[in-house]
C-alpha cells in the first residue's frame, strides 16, 4: 500500500510559475505520494539507469539532501479507499451488539506538485531511504553491546598490563591456587650481543633496594638494583646500611639516599624472586623500593664488566691478598705455585637451616675431595687456598697430605673483606653453597666447580631457587650426597 506524507516543496527559485499561479493539487489533478512498502503493487517500476539519471538532475540533488528519491508517476485515481463494512460484535459490558470500525490509515493531504523540467505539475513518488535501512533487533543490540564491552576491557588490560606484575591470578577467589612461577628470562649472555639493552640517554625517578642479609646477599642486591634501574631508565640509590657493608671493601659508585628522604618517600615496594623475569624489564614506577634476595646472573650478566668495576677491591685489600699468595710455596719442592684455586666452604647456620628447613645438605668431605681432584687432573700443581666460617672443620676433614692445601682465611663473618679478597685474587674457584662463594667465583673468572643437586626433589627451596639461574652454564657441578637426608626421612 501507499502512505502519503508531506514533502518539502521545490525551491521557489526553481519554479517556472509565480507563487500565485503555481499549480496546486486541485489544478493539476496530480498528487505526491511517498512509497513505503508495496510499490510494485501500484504499478510503479524502477530501473537502475533511471535512478542514475534522476540523481544527475539538479532539483533531485536538492531533494536528495532530505534522503528522498523523487520519481514521477501518474496520479492515483482515488486517494481515499472505499469504506469497509461495519462489523457487529457483542459488547462485554453492555452485553449488546457494538459497532466495530476497523482501523485504516488516515488519507494523506494533497501536496504541492513539482514544476521542474520533468513537466508542470508532474507527480512525484518519493522513495525514503529510511525504508531501506536495516533495523536491528533487541537481541542483536545486546550482543553488539556485550562484544563492545569485552573488546574495551581487553584493550584496557593490554594497555595497562604493567599494573599487574604478578598477572591476574584470582587468589582471593581461589585461596588454594598459587601463581605459576615466572620463567627465567635470559635477556642476553654477552655484553657484545646486539640484543643487550643500551645505556639510556637520560634517567628519571628514584629506585632503591632494601638491604638485607649478609655480605654476599647485599652484593646481589646491589648488582640487581644497578641492572634493573638501567634497564628501566631509572636513577639508582643505595641506603646507608648497604653502603656501610660494601664501601669498605669495594669502589662502589651508586649514591647514598639520606635516611630522612627514605622515610618521607611514598615508595611502592616490589619483592623480587631470585631470577630475571620479563616483567622486570617493563617497570613504570618512578618511586620503587625493591626487596628480596636476588643473586642471579640473569639479572646483570649483560653488565658483567660494569659489575666487576663496581666490585673492584680497594688497593690495600688487593695488595694484602697478593702479598699472602706470593709467599705460598709448594710443600714437597718449595717452588712457587702457578695456579691458585680459591675454596670457600660455607658452614655456620647452614648446618641447621639446610637439613631441617630446606631438606638439603652442605658441602661434605667427599664433595671437596672430588672437586680438588677435578682441578688436579686439569692443572699442574695447583694450590688450594681455603676460606670458611668453619675453619676448624676444614682442618679436620680436608686432606692435606699432598701439601697443596693452605688454610689462609680467618673465618670472621663480621669482616669478610680479607677472605673475599683472597678468593678473588686466585685463578679458579671451588664453592659449596651460598652467595659469598658465588660472587667470589663470578668475579674471579677461570674454572668454577659448585655443589649441585643439594636438596631433595620435593624441597620448598626449589620454589625460590632455580639452579639454571644461579650457576653459569660453563660452571661444573658435582652432585651432592643426599643419603643422610634420605636416612632421616625414613622409608
Image (cartoon, grey):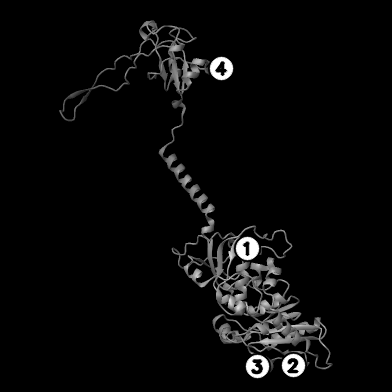
Q: Residues within 10 Å of mark 4 (few under 14, many from 20)?
A: few
Location of residue 281 in the rendering, given as x and y in whole percent from the top left corner? 60, 61
The answer to whether residue 296 is above or below residue 52 is below
**CA distance separating discs 4 and 2:** 109 Å
Q: Which of labels 4 and 2 is toward the front? A: 2
Identify the residue position indicated by label 3 in the image: 392
Residue at position x 71%, y 69% in the image: 305
Identify the residue position indicated by label 1 in the image: 230
Residue 40 appears left or right of 302: left
Location of residue 72 in the rendering, given as x and y in whole percent from the top left corner? 46, 13
The tag on residue 312 is none
**CA distance separating discs 3 and 1:** 43 Å
Identify the residue position indicated by label 2 in the image: 400
Identify the residue position indicated by label 4 in the image: 49
Secondary structure beneath label 4: helix
Residue 348 appears left or right of 149: right
Amino acid at each position: 500500500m501507499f502512505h502519503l506524507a508531506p514533502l518539502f516543496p521545490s525551491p521557489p527559485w526553481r519554479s517556472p510559475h509565480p507563487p500565485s499561479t503555481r499549480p496546486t493539487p486541485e489544478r493539476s489533478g496530480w498528487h505526491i505520494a511517498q512509497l513505503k512498502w508495496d510499490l510494485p503493487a501500484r504499478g510503479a517500476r524502477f530501473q537502475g539507469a533511471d535512478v542514475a539519471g534522476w540523481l544527475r538532475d539538479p532539483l533531485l540533488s536538492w531533494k536528495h539532501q532530505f534522503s528522498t528519491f523523487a520519481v514521477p508517476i501518474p496520479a492515483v485515481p482515488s486517494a481515499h479507499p472505499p469504506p469497509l463494512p461495519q462489523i457487529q460484535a457483542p459488547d462485554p459490558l453492555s452485553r449488546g451488539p457494538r459497532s466495530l470500525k476497523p482501523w485504516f490509515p488516515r488519507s494523506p493531504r494533497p501536496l504541492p506538485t513539482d514544476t521542474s523540467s520533468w513537466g508542470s505539475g508532474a507527480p512525484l513518488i518519493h522513495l525514503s531511504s529510511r525504508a531501506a535501512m536495516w533495523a536491528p533487533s533487541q537481541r542483536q543490540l545486546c550482543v553488539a553491546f556485550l562484544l563492545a564491552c569485552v573488546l574495551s576491557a581487553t584493550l584496557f588490560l593490554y594497555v595497562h598490563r604493567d599494573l599487574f606484575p604478578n598477572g591476574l591470578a584470582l587468589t582471593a577467589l581461589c585461596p588454594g591456587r598459587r601463581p605459576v612461577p615466572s620463567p627465567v628470562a635470559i635477556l642476553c649472555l654477552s655484553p657484545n650481543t646486539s640484543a643487550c639493552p643500551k645505556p639510556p640517554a637520560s634517567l628519571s625517578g628514584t629506585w632503591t633496594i632494601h638491604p638485607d642479609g649478609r655480605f654476599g646477599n647485599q652484593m646481589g642486591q646491589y648488582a640487581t638494583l644497578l641492572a634493573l634501574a638501567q634497564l628501566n631508565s631509572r636513577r639508582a640509590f643505595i641506603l646507608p646500611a648497604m653502603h656501610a657493608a660494601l664501601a669498605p671493601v669495594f669502589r662502589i659508585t651508586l649514591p647514598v639516599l639520606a635516611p630522612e628522604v627514605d622515610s618521607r618517600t611514598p615508595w611502592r615496594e616490589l619483592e623480587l624472586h631470585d631470577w630475571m623475569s620479563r616483567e622486570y624489564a617493563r617497570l613504570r614506577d618512578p618511586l620503587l623500593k625493591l626487596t628480596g634476595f636476588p643473586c642471579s646472573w640473569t639479572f646483570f650478566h649483560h653488565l658483567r664488566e660494569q659489575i666487576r668495576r663496581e666490585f673492584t677491591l680497594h688497593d690495600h685489600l688487593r695488595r694484602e691478598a697478593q702479598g699472602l699468595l706470593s709467599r705460598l710455596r709448594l710443600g714437597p719442592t718449595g717452588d712457587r705455585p702457578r695456579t691458585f684455586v680459591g675454596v670457600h666452604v660455607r658452614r655456620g647456620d647452614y648446618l641447621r637451616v639446610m637439613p631441617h628447613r630446606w631438606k638439603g645438605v652442605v658441602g661434605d668431605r667427599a664433595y671437596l675431595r672430588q672437586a680438588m681432584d677435578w682441578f688436579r687432573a686439569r692443572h699442574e700443581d695447583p694450590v688450594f687456598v681455603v676460606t670458611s666460617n668453619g675453619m676448624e672443620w676444614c682442618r679436620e676433614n680436608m686432606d692435606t697430605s699432598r701439601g697443596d692445601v693452605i688454610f689462609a682465611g680467618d673465618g670472621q663473618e663480621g669482616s669478610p673483606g680479607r677472605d673475599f679478597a683472597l678468593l678473588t685474587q686466585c685463578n679458579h674457584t671451588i664453592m659449596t653453597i651460598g652467595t659469598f662463594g658465588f660472587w667470589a667465583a663470578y668475579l674471579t673468572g677461570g674454572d668454577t666447580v659448585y655443589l649441585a643437586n643439594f636438596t631433595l626433589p620435593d624441597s620448598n627451596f626449589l620454589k625460590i631457587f632455580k639452579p639454571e639461574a644461579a650457576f653459569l652454564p660453563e660452571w661444573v657441578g658435582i652432585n651432592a650426597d643426599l643419603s643422610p637426608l634420605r636416612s632421616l626421612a625414613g622409608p
